[in-house]
Image (tube, coloured by chain):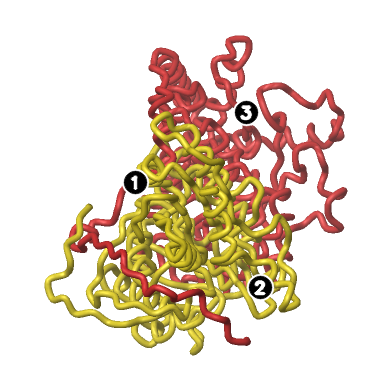
Chain colours: A red, B yellow
Amino acid sequence: MTQDDQTNTALHLDLYRMLVLIRRCQETIMNEYHPADEMRCPVHFCVGQEATPAALSLLMRPNDVVMSHHRSHGYYLAKGGSLDGLIAELYGKATGANGGLAGSQELSSHDVGFFSGTILSGMFAMATGAAFAQKYRASDGITVAVIGDGGMEEGIVFEALNLSAVFRLPILFVCENNIYSAHTRIDRRSLSETVSPRAAPFGVLTHILDGNDPILLARELAKILGHIRKNSAPAFVEVVTYRTCGHVGPENDDVLNYRPSEELLKWKERDPLAILRKTFLQSGIVGKDLEAIEKGINREILAAIKRAKEAPFPKIEDALRANWSNATAPVVGNISNSSDTSFRSGQAETRLAPY
Amino acid sequence: MNKSKPAAASNKVVNFGEAINMATRQAMELDESVFLYGLGADSPAGIFGSTKGLVDRFGSKRVFDTPVSEQALTAMAAGAANAGLRPILVHQRLDFMLYTMDQIVNWISLWHFKSSGRSRMPLTIRTIVGKGWGQGPQHAKSLHTWFAHVPGLKVVVPATPYDAKGLLLASIFSDDPVVFIEGRSLYAMKQEVPEAPYLVELGRALVRRPGKDVTIVAFGSMVPHALEAADLLAMEGPSAEVVDLRTLMPLDMETVCHSVARTRRLVVAEPGWRMFGAAAEIVAGVVENPKVSLVAPPKRVTWPHSHVPTSAPLEAAYYPDAKAILAACRATLA
């Protein structure tokens, strides 16, 4: 094996670890969910869509920011969010990433630069502000905004694309086109099954990538991110992928017959973990090594679940107090308070001038 | 209350718009993370003078015009504030903010909450309520009640140049999201203000005029009318105490109740629609207070529960003024 091969193999193993972490995390939570019913919030699992966050996990830096939709566990973990924080948040515990106040749908971890929210397109748009701040401060960080094909139909998306180009923001827009918005297929919502052409008229560079090939994604996203970092300009990547689990919750919603079984089967055969495993055959990694990785990760996840179950709940008083920070900028210490009751008596509102 | 004045007591007579300009300029000098943007933010007219000259002083990195995309601009403010900058987003009319209610309510207002206090939104949204010269139903709304109703927001409504400057500085340097509502019709009002920066504390009402017979609680563009009504009432004998709320959220019911506990009569003058408005909240807060007992039913002086007509005589008939407040005071004294 050459040095390059060794480097590649090391990278591929990192990719694999992240894929396994995300996949096993999702599957374990799905198994734990019922009948215990101790995780009491809607969870949108990302089974089948792990390749993009795993690829990004190799490429994102601590001062990069990710803003994601609600199907976010992969991106949370990929950005370095704590497993304990994720699981405890689903259990609504005080030790959760958001102290139990956000649940799965609005998960965030400020310290690792990961944010999410469930109102479609909101995070896509807020990412323009994150990128603006990075540029304003001349930091070398960039922002990754993640959206689905459904979210792409909200109006603010077009405003945000325009803004990113006009202001030259260092932002990577990632659209996970899994062709379903909940149970509604894309052909019922749009005359085109491809979304990236919508970004091009605003002057944003667009790419369409296979969303299930982890190595391809790592390679291509590296180039695209490199371009963004160098030129402070936005890019839009459509990753074509598929959700093999249900839309929400651990239940399988295929009983609703909203998608053809052949389609689901075809995508199950394109499992990103299986695609990556195939490459290991060439590089001498044996099944036992991969099993060891999986065993270790399984142990971590189960331990996190145990800790989450034992953790305390937050208090309602703390939640009620969390609406305002009531904090002020440090500079306030240098400015005096002042008040003045004077008012020129008889000074009514003025008559407006014409415009 | 801290009533210290700046050491070098040099003052300047400015109007409401210039006071806002002064506060913005001083905030931007004090803190590099403050920036200002919005439709027309850097135009020579300077949004009725409130942003005039700022781009010349600070450059286009920190003062800039924008595409006509209020929603994305608000989302951008949120993302920048989350990153620790202090954006000031300006809307020339409050009506234009309605595009942005999703950003404000579904994201900005609850961001600190859902992060369990880890993340903040230190942003200020300046917005102007049109009045007069046929602004009409789409250019004259004041939805302060909507914003005050949403947990997580602060809502500031200055009535004088002095307060506009101090409250805007306090708003910009607050780590909470502030909706800063400016009455267009107050813009030409003049007052002497200290040249140096100063803060007017958020959430503190002010007794503008002491009195003993009836309390008039007012805010924003109703404050001048409340003071005029107090003058007119005084000519008939009774003295009205005028309380200027200055901030709607946090709401200073302590100052209000302290006043009404003495006068035992309440008139609330609100520059907004009648039903489910801020005046209703203040009346409820007074009536609920076991330490206050009224000797007459409270009165609300508000806009009618109607959109604003454009035709000039209708507009004049629509807006209540000092005479309406005077009539309400008389009713409580009858």
Disc 1 residue crowd, few under 14, some 14–19, many 20+, Cα 10 Å: few
Most foreground residue, A135 or A341 = A341
Q: Residue at x 45, y 34 (%)?
A: B293
Q: Amino acid at mark 1?
A: Asn
Same chain, labels 2 and 1: yes
Counting every numbered tag in the picture gives: 3
Q: Secondary structure at mark 3?
A: loop
User: Which tag, 2 or 1, sits closer to the chain's start?
Assistant: 2
Same chain, labels 2 and 3: yes
User: Which tag, 1 or 3, sits closer to the chain's start?
Assistant: 3
Q: Is residue A228 visible?
A: no
Q: Amino acid at mark 2?
A: Phe
Foreground disc of the pair 2, 1: 1
At which x and y percent is residue A181?
Answer: 75, 43
Write down the chain letter for disc 1. A
User: Which tag, 2 or 3, sits closer to the chain's start?
Assistant: 3
Most foreground residue, A280 or A155 = A155
- Residue B266, compared with residue A340, is above or below; it is above
Cα gap from disc 1 to disc 3, whole angstroms: 31 Å
Q: Amino acid at mark 3?
A: Pro
* B80 on left or right of B210: right
Q: Is residue B86 visible?
A: yes
Which numbered circle lies on residue A326? 1
Write down the chain letter for disc 2. A
Cα gap from disc 2 to disc 3, whole angstroms: 35 Å
Which numbered circle lies on residue A202? 2
Q: Quadrant of residue B270?
A: bottom right
Most foreground residue, B25 or A223 = B25
* A279 on left or right of A309: right
Disc 3 residue crowd, few under 14, some 14–19, many 20+, Cα 10 Å: some
* A90 on left or right of A179: left
Q: Check disc 3 and report the residue beneath it.
A: A42
